[in-house]
Structures are given as structure tokens and as C-alpha cells.
Amino acid sequence: MPLSADIDTPLLEARHLVKRYAHAPRGKEITVVNDVSFTLARQRTLGIIGESGCGKSTIAKMLMQIEKPSAGELYMHAKPYASLDKTEFRHGIQMIFQDCYGSLNPRRKAIDIVSEPLLVSTTLSAQECRQRAQEVLTQVGLTSVYWYRFPHMFSGGQRQRIGIARAIITRPQIVICDEPVSALDISVQAQIINLLMTLQQKYQLSYLLISHDLAVVNHISDDILVMYFGKIAEYGCATKIFAQPRHPYTQALLNSTARIAAADKPKPPALRGEIPSPFDPPRGCAFHTRCPRAQQLCREQVPALRNLDDTQVACHFAE
Ligand SMILES: Nc1ncnc2c1ncn2[C@@H]1O[C@H](COP(=O)(O)OP(=O)(O)OP(=O)(O)O)[C@@H](O)[C@H]1O
Ligand code: SF4
Ligand SMILES: [Mg+2]
């Protein structure tokens, strides 16, 4: 059941999210998510992209209440997270993990893994929960021969199908997918992405899709949020950003993908250099150490996130 009937209210909203971790050995605090705001609308997909360590999973953990934000606010249907009860939260948002094997109990059969979230969050009987699990397992492409098998008896793609069935059985409106296909073979990746798209239509799901693979994000996202070093580099409509990326980091990411896609074509410049250390953040724009367009201003001043033609961009020279 929707928490609110208001169609215009974003399902999910993050306002100025910050996450800092204290690193005892070096006595230093690092900021891994820094002032990140976004909204997720009904039946839309927001893709979050960026290199390893830029804070993507940390955002997912805060959205799932696995980690507490150091600052900022989270809302579901305009209601602050703190005001949601456990059941309301569980029925609003669920997550699919990259390492589905690690997240499935090896001693439980597929049907029990999938029915568990219903058992613990509803008053349905065990029999009713199993029945729903059978329906959902069938919907994700696992017929009755698979229901009583243990996780180790499945392929990677099949295990991810179990993870998806477990996530959707409570009929959440939002599903966070953290690198849902990056552990799978290319051919299986396409099947899982297609399954996610079919389920989105069937259940009017909203996805927050985290991936370092632009091709995956491009295929399925309505909006994208490009992150660099804990901050938003660029955020807006996916079609617009893919057609005309304004941030040099987005341009470099797209160029890297183009290099792979067209191996026989002239190579655009790829992303060069190393990601800075969070223990020693650069002054000014965090991307200046790798940016082909960096100038003195970039080394001195942090670029504000500005609205340009309905896309948010954090670059002094985005025009
Ligand atoms: N519990 C923790 N304690 C301290 N630092 C952490 C903790 N969890 C994550 N970090 C640090 O926070 C930063 C962001 O990590 P995060 O897992 O969010 O990145 P990511 O974008 O998901 O990367 P990947 O693409 O590799 O999954 C990294 O520098 C990581 O080392
Ligand atoms: S602000 Fe400067 S360093 Fe940062 S992305 Fe823009 S041009 Fe590059
Ligand atoms: Mg991650």
C-alpha cells in the first residue's frame, strides 16, 4: 500500500546527506559522502555512477538504515525516516545486493529465503507466505524444480533471481540495486536487467541503480547522478546527460565506455590519474588533479552545484 496518495510527492528524497567515518589508527575523520541531495519519483530509475570508493554503497546503506547519516535528512513520501515504523519502512524499500551469494543463508532453501521477509513483517501464515514465495519465484523465472534447492545449487544469475524475489515479495515501492549485475557474465547481465525492467512495469517499482558500468545505467535509468569523491559531479535527466555531458568527469567516464565500445575507432582521451586519498582531500575542485580542463581557479575554489538547463553540474567551466 502506498504510504501516501499524493502522486507528486517523491517516493524518496535525500537532502544534504553526509557520511563521515572516524579512522582510529590515523586519528582522522574522512568524509565519504558530502552534501548529496536527490529525489526518486514513482516508477522511475535513478542511476548512481562513479568509480570505486566514491560513496555509492554508503548512500545505499544510509537509505536502508544500515548506516546512520552524519548529517542531512531522508524522507519517504515526504515523511522523515525517523517517523516511519519498521513495517512501513520494510514495505517501502528493499535492496538487492551485488554479492547475492554472501547475502543468502546457505542452510536455507530458496523458498524459505524468499518467504522470510513476509513471515517477519506480516500476519500471514507460514503457508500463505510460502504460496506468495512460489508466485514470486515463478515471476523471476524459477519454476517449481528450483524452490527446494539450497543457494550453492544455483548459478550466479539464478542466485540473483532469488535475491530479487526476496526483495520484491513484500511489494516494496522502492528497490535499491547495488551493482546487481557486476558479478555476472555479460549474457546473464542482460537477462537480469531485462527481468528488473519487466518487474518495474508489473509492480510499478522505483529503482535506485548503483553501478560503475555506464552501459547498464544508460540502458535502464531515467535520471543519473554522477558522483566523484563523495560529491555530486552531475545530476539530471539521463538522456540529456548522455547526449551532452557537461562535467569533465562525466565526459571522461563516457569516453572510457566509448573506447571499449568502438575499439577500432580513434580513441578519445580516457580517464587518467588516481582518485585522491580521502585522508588528504585536494583543495578546490576534487577532480582538478585529473581534469584536462583544470585551471588555477579549480585548485582554489570548490565549484558550487549549479543548475544549467535543468541539469545540476559542479564545475566552474560547465558552460
Ligand atoms: N565502515 C567504514 N569505515 C570506514 N570507511 C569506510 C567504511 N565503509 C566505507 N568506507 C570508505 O568510504 C568510501 C566509500 O565507500 P563505498 O563503499 O561507499 O564506495 P563505492 O562507491 O560503493 O565503491 P565500490 O564501487 O568499490 O563499491 C571508501 O573510501 C571506503 O573505504
Ligand atoms: S571545476 Fe575545474 S577541475 Fe573541476 S571539473 Fe571543472 S574544469 Fe575540471
Ligand atoms: Mg559499492
Image: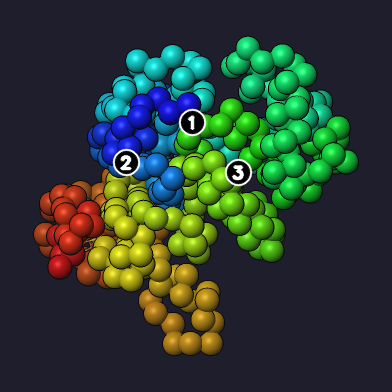
Dot 2 amino acid type:
Thr
- At x 54%, y 82%, the residue is 263
Query: Residue 94 in the image: x percent, y percent?
Result: 53, 32
Quarter occupied by residue 308: bottom left
Left or right of 162? Residue 61 is: left
Q: Quadrant of residue 242?
A: bottom left
Which residue is more in the foreground, 122 or 212? 122
SS at mark 1? strand
Q: Is mark 3 within 8 Å of ligand 3?
A: yes
Label 2 and label 3: CA atoms lie apart by 23 Å
* Residue corresponding to mark 1: 93
Q: CA distance from mark 2 to mark 1?
A: 14 Å
Mark 1 and 3 residues: CB-CB less than 8 Å, in contact? no
Q: Amino acid at mark 1?
A: Ile
- Determine the image quadrant of residue 14: top left
Mark seen at residue 39: 2
